[in-house]
Image (tube, rainbow, N blue to C red):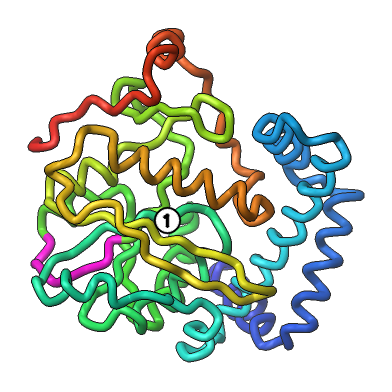
């Protein structure tokens, strides 16, 4: 039997049945060990926070870094619990407060794109959303794991409540062959872009730094006439979250290039400043430099929209 199966059935599944108090106790122990001994991406976290909040004292930077690791290991514990969490429990722990705002799209038979980010616990959201969007199919665009067996097992677990997953490698094929079923197409869109020319990216000031954003979700919205909403995920307490749909546009083809992505960047920045500990600070978000031409253009522009053909 492959090691991946053993890991899944003999580690993840049994751990998921442990009481919440035990899981959070393990989380606290891991946070202490990481901060004092292991230091997983500690330099990255501290540097990201220091540059994003230049007015912070070193004591405030350290406090936020500790808070981040506390939340990070809590979210790992919560994600392990998902392997045996019921649909009802998932909905109670991540409630969509206003699903009715897209009722008009369901009635019209229209799909829509929901922008999300590595903010709060997006894994619980993946399990809880489908039961809360009656009449829609929830579709998550995701990055496959390197281990094919674990990837399949994780997809099956994430799909227990009906959510379907589409690899980011075949997103265009999905849009080209979509059968018209009203669908919530969920993009986690705050990754660091890779293998893309700077002209194809959306550039803006984000947390005080020149930052590139992927233009893919906006391109699909315009090309396939998908309304766009920001999925505002907030932590309400340990293990409890709410999600709120915030409209960006119901008519993407009437927006200026870059408008949709810029709205996402501004909304996400606002949420990070409101509750900074729940963003993924250990991600190397700014690992690539800023091209000279981008820096020059941004001296006179608020942002640089991507260059792409919305029709092709």
| Residue 197 position by quadrant | top left
In this picture, residue 293 sits left or right of residue 184? right
Q: Quadrant of the N terminus?
A: bottom right
Look at mark 1 in the image and give the residue it sits on.
116
Closer to the camera in the image, 45 or 102: 102
Measured from the top left, where is residue 103 in percent x and y? 21, 76
Q: Residue at x 72, y 63 (%)?
A: 73
**Does 68 appear in magenta?**
no
User: Does 226 appear above or below 273?
Assistant: below
Please, what secondary structure does the residue beneath circle 1 have? strand
User: Does 232 appear above or below 216?
Assistant: below
In this picture, residue 176 sits left or right of residue 10? left
**Does 183 appear in magenta?**
yes
Q: Residue at x 52, y 86 (%)?
A: 92
Measured from the top left, where is residue 205 in percent x and y? 49, 28
Q: Which residues are magenta?
A: 178-185
Q: Residue at x 38, y 83 (%)?
A: 161
| Residue 247 position by quadrant | bottom left
Measured from the top left, where is residue 86 in percent x and y? 50, 90
Q: Residue at x 42, y 56 (%)?
A: 116
User: Does 58 appear above or below 37?
Assistant: above
Our reading of the magenta stretch's main secondary structure is loop
| Residue 140 position by quadrant | bottom left
Q: Quadrant of the C terminus?
A: top left
Q: Which class describes the residues within 10 Å of circle 1: few (<14), some (14-19), or many (20+)?
A: some
């Amino acid at each position: 039997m492959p090691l991946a199966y053993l890991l899944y059935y003999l580690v993840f599944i049994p751990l998921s049945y442990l009481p919440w108090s035990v899981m959070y106790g393990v989380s606290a122990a891991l946070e202490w060990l990481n901060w004092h001994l292991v230091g997983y991406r500690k330099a990255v976290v501290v540097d990201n926070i220091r540059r994003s909040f230049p007015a912070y004292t070193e004591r405030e930077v350290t406090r936020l870094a500790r808070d981040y690791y506390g939340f990070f290991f809590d979210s790992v514990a919560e994600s392990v619990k998902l392997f045996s969490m019921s649909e009802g429990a998932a909905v109670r722990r991540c409630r969509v407060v206003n699903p009715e705002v897209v009722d008009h799209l369901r009635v019209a038979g229209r799909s829509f794109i929901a922008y999300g980010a590595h903010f709060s616990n997006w894994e619980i959201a993946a399990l809880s959303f489908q039961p809360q969007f009656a009449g829609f199919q929830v579709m998550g665009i995701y990055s496959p794991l390197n281990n094919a067996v674990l990837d399949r097992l994780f997809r099956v677990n994430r799909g227990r409540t009906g959510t379907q997953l589409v690899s980011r490698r075949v997103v265009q094929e999905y849009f080209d062959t979509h059968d018209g079923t009203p669908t919530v197409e969920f993009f986690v869109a705050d990754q660091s872009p890779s293998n893309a020319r700077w002209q194809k990216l959306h550039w803006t000031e984000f947390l005080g730094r020149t930052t590139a954003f992927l233009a893919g979700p906006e391109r699909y919205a315009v090309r396939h006439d998908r309304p766009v909403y920001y999925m505002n995920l907030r932590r309400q307490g340990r293990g409890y979250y709410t999600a709120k749909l915030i409209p960006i546009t119901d008519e993407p083809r009437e927006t200026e290039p870059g408008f949709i992505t810029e709205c996402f960047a501004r909304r996400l920045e606002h949420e990070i400043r409101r509750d900074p500990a729940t963003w993924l600070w250990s991600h190397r978000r700014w690992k690539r430099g800023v091209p000279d031409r981008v820096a020059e253009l941004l001296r006179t522009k608020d942002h640089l929209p991507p260059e792409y053909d919305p029709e092709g």
